[in-house]
Image: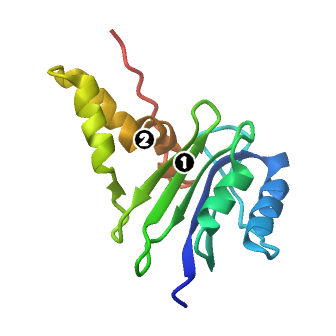
Amino acid sequence: MTAHAARGVLYVHSSPSALCPHIEWAAGRALGRAVNFTWETQPVLKGAQRAEFFWDGPQGTGARIATALRGWEHLRFEVTEDAGLGTDGGRWMHTPDLGIFFVQTDTAGNTVVAEDRIRYAMEVAGSNPLELQRELRLALGQAWDDELEPFRRAHDDTSVIWLHKVG
């Protein structure tokens, strides 16, 4: 891998079957080459498919893939781009309800929240710890993680148990 090369993973968590070839085309266009995914049934959502695709390309390819896929109705996905020598990594998450979210990542894949964003959260929250928690959850993309988590964990050989908050 050269100093200007990057790699990562595209996780298509759920896609309508009819959209699958279009996703491959869009990802391939962002990568500059044709790609084929191995599609599997997504047990969380009837009629949906899921796929994982490991990619490599120039730095910024993760952003190009996420841009090519963002905003498509009924599509849930994540794109990661690993950090490299002198470069930060990134993670893009997309859901139909929330849209797209980007967060910087370190070499271990941890979310990096900038100092200014933390200071803003503290300023907005003042002395209210619940507001600080809300702001930090927003900075971390917690709503996206919460929505995508059942789709990440679902496999053909596991059963999905939906828990609903009451009260």
Rendered image quadrant of residue 164: top left
* 145 sits to left or right of 66: left
* 154 sits to left or right of 110: right
Question: Tag 1 or tag 2, which sits nearer the N-term?
Answer: 1
Q: Nearer the viewer, residue 25 or 44?
A: 25
Q: Position of residue 148 (x, y in %)?
A: 51, 42
Q: CA distance from mark 2 to mark 1?
A: 8 Å
Looking at the image, which residue is at 50% across and 50% down? 152
Q: Quadrant of the C terminus?
A: top left
Rendered image quadrant of residue 57: bottom right
Q: Nearer the viewer, residue 155 or 36?
A: 36
Q: Which residue is mark 2?
A: 141
Q: Is residue 155 visible?
A: yes
Q: Is residue 51 visible?
A: no
Q: Nearer the viewer, residue 145 or 62?
A: 62
Q: Residues within 10 Å of mark 2 (few under 14, many from 20)?
A: some
Rendering colour mode:
rainbow
Name the outermost residue toward the left.
Answer: 127
Residue 110 against residue 44 in the figure, above or below: below
Amino acid type indicated by mark 2:
Gly
Name the outermost residue toward the top.
Answer: 167
Q: Which residue is mark 1?
A: 93
Amino acid type indicated by mark 1:
Met
Rendered image quadrant of residue 51: bottom right
Contact, mark 2 vs mark 1 (Cβ under 8 Å): yes
Residue 118 - label: none
Q: Residues within 10 Å of mark 1 (few under 14, many from 20)?
A: many
Looking at the image, which residue is at 37% across and 19% down? 165
Count of numbered badges drawn on the protein:
2
Label 2: state its secondary structure. Answer: loop
Q: Position of residue 12 (x, y in %)?
A: 64, 54
Looking at the image, which residue is at 46% across and 31% down? 162
